[in-house]
């Protein structure tokens, strides 16, 4: 367990973003990081603009820890915006205080203030990431979290020679908060991004990108581990490397049964680890990423590239582009997702809840509400079970812990108010929703099955859902309306993928299961920032258990106040 005196200063390693291994202490340690939220002028695509960063870096520093470590990250806010940071995918057992979503588990860190996120990394190893969880600031405030397995525990796949982190993102030439303000004034989606990026760089298919291309050098015959993260705000992405297949070995910090693929699909919030063999003719090969979008909605569909470069090959050799699936290739998306399965080995078992205590069925809807201040008098909105979530003014976890009245209600419905043909003909009338800060109360240690059902309110669309505080098992998915009589018989209760973010297919459904053994208030939301902003979110209040280790920990002394 964590020991005093075995301090380890992560900040010494912040500049190591490239391929390489960082030596970590063998034993669990206390790891300290300093995150200074600073505004920095950054130039991309021939435009310079001030962006919010951590320590002036874009992407921000990698948190590099070992399973069992105690991590202390002191976030000091020097920017003009309120800030909070989410450690995406870390389970934060009994410790929602360190989870980060603003007004859900904490009040924001105000300008000039600090807050130390204090958490233990237990029972997890692999790739996760961190990002701002307030406004749209995660557009530039994000970085990787790498959790190495305990000393002496090898990967359950061939040891790679080196590794690299690839963070896929979205870039706007103008101030993102201003873009969002303009969209909200119209009641419409904000203007789409100007580029996609790989490690903050758009690559040579964009102008002024000579210096803004990520290059990963490889040696012939060696195997590399790529830790791929989708940090984009609104786009599910395909990713491929010209001439090289990839072997998927882990998703969302959970090992998978390995399979080989020419391209992968990754939704905002998700991570994917792949092995790549540098076994082709020595040369320069593009790694490329571009969105998946299988409904006719206007999105930024531009391709970001980085370069896989064999050692000794000059920069003058023109790279080859990979073939990415077509933007609307639903068939590829479905068949790729179907291949993802938990490793489920004796060492890394998949403990799927087999008996369900609580059945939940939530419909995902877009809608339209009156908006007197908007240009058209209406604004686009989004809802779960027809409820558009209203953000409270203080943290919900505080309200729960200190039993403050009037902050939230616990009557979030287990099913939609009015059943309808969810994925039938598009519904374009009566698109109003009801507003509320309504949570769903879950008994400690109960097993929950949640079916997320897309609807054709306005349009069908694919939605990546993220649950805080837990991993869940994706036991089933399908196109059309979920059939409670027939579909459960087809569930995979043996080796379903275990993750923290899952794409609900366009006009379809996804069923997840988890055991509510982590008390606290846990946010669940669509990880498309546009939809989160529009209210496609809710939270679970998981009650304390009776045992000594089954209640929410006391809040830290420096927890920000509102
Ligand atoms: C940032 O860059 C822009 C454009 O070059 C320039 O106008 C502005 O003064 C710079 N701001 C800072 C703080 O350096
Ligand atoms: C966090 O950093 C700030 C700014 O450097 C410093 O004033 C504060 O003492 C630090 N907090 C802790 C707990 O180290
Ligand atoms: C981390 O683990 C240590 C040792 O078990 C424990 O004392 C401490 O309370 C834990 N901290 C958090 C934030 O969970
Ligand atoms: C990649 O996989 C495909 C399909 O299995 C196979 O046809 C192709 O030869 C493989 N390419 C490489 C470079 O191994
Ligand atoms: C990208 O979108 C534009 C319209 O915004 C369209 O003209 C173009 O064909 C699209 N490209 C691809 C590859 O789908
Ligand atoms: C995908 O897009 C292409 C080009 O826009 C179009 O020709 C094709 O019909 C679309 N496929 C599907 C399945 O919608
Ligand atoms: C907003 O109003 C404009 C002009 O009346 C119209 O063209 C547009 O379709 C409206 N948008 C929405 C979402 O209602
Ligand atoms: C739902 O709508 C679909 C598409 O319009 C239709 O095929 C189906 O029969 C409808 N289902 C019911 C139960 O009405
Ligand atoms: C959602 O709630 C609004 C307001 O109560 C209502 O007008 C609308 O019919 C409801 N829609 C659905 C799909 O339940
Ligand atoms: C949770 O429930 C399971 C039965 O589903 C039981 O075996 C286990 O002991 C319980 N755990 C706790 C911490 O209460
Ligand atoms: C509570 O947790 C501590 C540290 O994780 C552990 O040592 C102790 O045995 C646990 N107690 C119970 C009753 O589970
Ligand atoms: C920052 O957060 C505090 C606490 O919630 C709030 O009172 C204040 O209005 C926020 N400031 C801005 C600029 O949003």
Image (cartoon, helix red, strand yellow):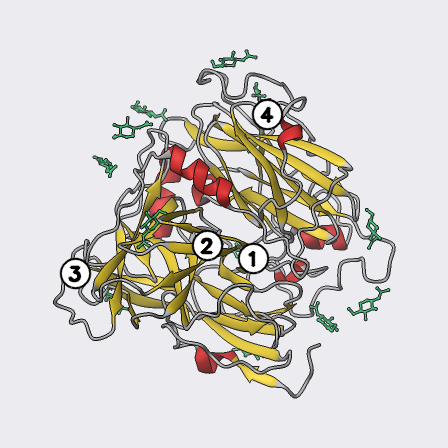
Q: Residues within 10 Å of mark 2 (few under 14, many from 20)?
A: many
- Residue 363: percent from left, percent from top: 58, 29
User: Furthest residue to the left?
Assistant: 316
| Viewer-closest of 114 and 466 | 466
Which residue in the structure is indicated by mark 1? Answer: 255
| Residue sitting at x 72%, y 42% | 406
Q: Give me the disc on residue 482.
A: 4
C-alpha gap between disc 3 and disc 4 = 48 Å
| Residue sitting at x 51%, y 46% | 340
Earlier along the polypeptide chain: callout 1 or callout 3? 3
Earlier along the polypeptide chain: callout 2 or callout 1? 2
Earlier along the polypeptide chain: callout 3 or callout 4? 3
| Label 2 secondary element | strand
C-alpha gap between disc 1 and disc 3 = 39 Å
| Viewer-closest of 459 and 411 | 459
- Residue 112: percent from left, percent from top: 50, 70
| Label 3 secondary element | loop
- Residue 37: percent from left, percent from top: 45, 68
User: Of the residues tagged 3 and 4, which is closer to the observer?
Assistant: 4
C-alpha gap between disc 2 and disc 4 = 29 Å
Against 435, residue 249 (above or below) is: below
User: Of the residues tagged 1 and 3, which is closer to the observer?
Assistant: 1
Q: How crowded is mark 1: few (under 14 residues within 10 Å), some or many (20 or more)?
A: many
Quadrant for residue 92, please give it: bottom right
Which residue in the structure is indicated by mark 2? Answer: 248
Which residue in the structure is indicated by mark 3? Answer: 208
| Label 4 secondary element | loop
> Which image quarter has ligand 3?
bottom right
Query: Is residue 532 among what the camera can see?
Result: no
Earlier along the polypeptide chain: callout 4 or callout 1? 1
């Amino acid at each position: 367990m964590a020991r005093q005196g075995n301090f380890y200063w992560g900040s010494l390693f912040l500049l190591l973003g490239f391929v390489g291994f960082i030596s970590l202490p063998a034993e669990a340690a206390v790891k300290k990081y300093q995150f200074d939220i600073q505004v920095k002028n950054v130039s991309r695509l021939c435009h310079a603009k001030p962006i919010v960063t951590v320590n002036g870096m874009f992407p921000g520093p990698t948190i590099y820890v070992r399973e069992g470590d105690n991590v202390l990250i002191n976030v000091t806010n020097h920017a003009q915006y309120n800030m909070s940071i989410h450690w995406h995918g870390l389970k934060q057992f009994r410790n929602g205080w360190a989870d980060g979503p603003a007004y859900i588990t904490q009040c924001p860190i105000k300008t000039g203030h600090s807050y130390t996120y204090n958490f233990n990394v237990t029972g997890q190893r692999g790739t996760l990431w961190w990002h701002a969880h307030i406004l749209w600031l995660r557009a530039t405030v994000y970085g990787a979290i790498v959790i190495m397995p305990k000393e002496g525990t090898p990967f359950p796949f061939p040891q790679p020679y080196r590794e690299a982190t690839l963070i896929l993102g979205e870039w706007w030439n103008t101030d993102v908060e201003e873009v969002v303000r303009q969209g909200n004034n119209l009641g419409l989606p904000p203007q789409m991004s100007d580029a996609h990026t790989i490690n903050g760089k758009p690559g040579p298919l964009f102008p002024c990108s000579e210096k803004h291309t990520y290059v990963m050098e490889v040696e012939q015959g060696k195997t590399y581990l790529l830790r791929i993260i989708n940090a984009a705000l609104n786009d599910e992405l395909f990713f491929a490397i010209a001439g090289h297949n990839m072997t998927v070995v882990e998703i969302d910090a959970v090992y998978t049964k390995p399979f080989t693929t020419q391209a992968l699909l990754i939704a905002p919030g998700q991570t994917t680890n792949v092995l790549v063999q540098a076994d082709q003719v020595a040369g320069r090969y593009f790694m490329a990423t571009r969105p998946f979008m299988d409904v006719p909605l206007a999105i930024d569909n531009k391709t970001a590239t980085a370069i896989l470069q064999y050692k000794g090959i000059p920069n003058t050799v023109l790279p080859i582009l990979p073939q990415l699936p077509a933007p609307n290739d639903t068939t590829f998306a479905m068949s790729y997702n179907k291949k993802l399965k938990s490793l489920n080995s004796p060492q890394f078992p998949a403990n799927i809840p087999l008996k369900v205590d609580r059945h939940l069925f939530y419909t995902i809807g877009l809608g339209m509400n009156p908006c007197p201040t908007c240009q058209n008098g209406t604004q686009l909105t989004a809802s779960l079970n027809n409820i558009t979530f209203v953000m409270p003014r203080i943290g919900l976890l505080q309200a729960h812990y200190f039993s403050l009245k009037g902050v939230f209600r616990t009557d979030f419905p287990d099913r939609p108010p009015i059943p309808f043909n969810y994925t039938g003909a598009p519904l374009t009338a009566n698109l109003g929703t009801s507003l509320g800060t309504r949570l769903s109360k879950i008994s400690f240690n109960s097993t929950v099955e949640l079916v997320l059902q897309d609807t054709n309110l306005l349009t069908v669309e694919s939605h990546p859902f993220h649950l805080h505080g837990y991993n869940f098992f994706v036991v089933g998915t399908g196109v059309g309306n979920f059939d409670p009589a027939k579909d459960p018989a087809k569930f995979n209760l043996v080796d379903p993928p275990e993750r923290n973010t899952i794409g609900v297919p366009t006009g379809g459904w996804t069923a997840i299961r988890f055991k509510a053994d982590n008390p606290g208030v846990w946010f669940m939301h669509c990880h498309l920032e546009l939809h989160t902003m529009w209210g496609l979110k809710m939270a679970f209040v998981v009650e304390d258990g009776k045992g000594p280790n089954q209640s929410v920990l006391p809040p830290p002394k420096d927890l920000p106040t509102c």
